[in-house]
């Protein structure tokens, strides 16, 4: 299992484009298909991984690894997830420094931006559905939308520190849903 976990997260690490949140659906699919955890456990874990310091994809990989294989699972997942990044960033940095103004490179990045945005929106949608939010408006969905809107306004309009928004959102969640 540890070797399979290492290879799986190494492969995810090699194809990670657009940051951690865009990889959440990929990690979820792999964790569920390998039977390392169920959907509810994954959904709960994402909330913790997102609130923890560090990149969410790496945090998620470590938490999946720990859930499935204890400390050894966490270690191989972390190494598998980060090793490709280390190797690719070194290689990409050398190439990008040399070819960053080439028209094909600039065009490729223009094409990747909407793809990465789509992955982030897909991850948000999956987390929304996994969190029990239905498309029908009930009081839980209304509260979810209100917390989302309040957090977005606090971050964008008032430039409130994200940690403060996380803390307040968690406290509001406890007040509303406990």
Image: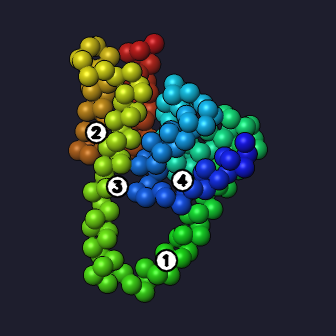
Dot placed on the residue nearer the N-terminal end, 4 or 3: 4
User: Can residue 67 be seen here?
Assistant: yes
Distance (Cα) linking label 2 and label 3: 20 Å
User: Can residue 143 be seen here?
Assistant: no
Residue 2 position in % (x across, y down):
73, 45
Distance (Cα) linking label 2 and label 1: 33 Å
The residue that appears at 32% across and 24% down in the rendered structure is 144
Distance (Cα) linking label 1 and label 4: 20 Å
The residue that appears at 73% across and 37% down in the rendered structure is 69
- Residue designated by label 2: 152
Q: Is residue 73 left or right of residue 121?
A: right
| Mark 4 Cα-neighbour bin, 10 Å: few <14, some 14–19, many ≥20 | many
> How many numbered marks have been drawn onto this rendered protein structure?
4
The residue that appears at 68% across and 47% down in the rendered structure is 4
Distance (Cα) linking label 1 and label 3: 20 Å
| Residue depth check, mark 2 versus mark 1: number of the one nearer the observer | 1
| Residue depth check, mark 1 versus mark 4: number of the one nearer the observer | 4
Dot placed on the residue nearer the N-terminal end, 2 or 1: 1
- Residue designated by label 3: 116
Residue 8 position in % (x across, y down):
61, 50
| Residue depth check, mark 4 versus mark 3: number of the one nearer the observer | 4
Q: Secondary structure at mark 2?
A: helix
Residue 47 position in % (x across, y down):
49, 33
């Amino acid at each position: 299992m540890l070797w399979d976990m290492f290879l799986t997260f190494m492969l995810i690490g090699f194809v990670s484009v657009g940051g951690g949140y865009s990889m959440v659906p990929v990690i979820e699919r792999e964790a569920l298909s390998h039977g390392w955890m169920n959907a509810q456990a994954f959904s709960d874990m994402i909330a913790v991984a997102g609130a923890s310091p560090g990149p969410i994809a790496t945090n998620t990989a470590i938490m999946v690894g720990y859930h499935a294989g204890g400390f050894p699972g966490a270690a191989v997942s972390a190494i598998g997830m980060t090793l490709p990044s280390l190797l690719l960033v070194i290689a990409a940095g050398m190439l990008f420094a040399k070819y960053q103004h080439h028209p094909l490179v600039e065009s490729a990045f223009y094409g990747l931006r909407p793809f990465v945005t789509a992955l982030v929106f897909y991850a948000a949608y999956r987390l929304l559905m996994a969190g029990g939010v239905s498309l029908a408006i009930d009081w839980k969905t209304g509260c979810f939308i209100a917390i989302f809107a309040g957090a977005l306004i606090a971050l964008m309009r008032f430039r409130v520190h994200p940690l403060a928004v996380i803390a307040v959102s968690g406290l509001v969640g406890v007040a509303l849903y406990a």
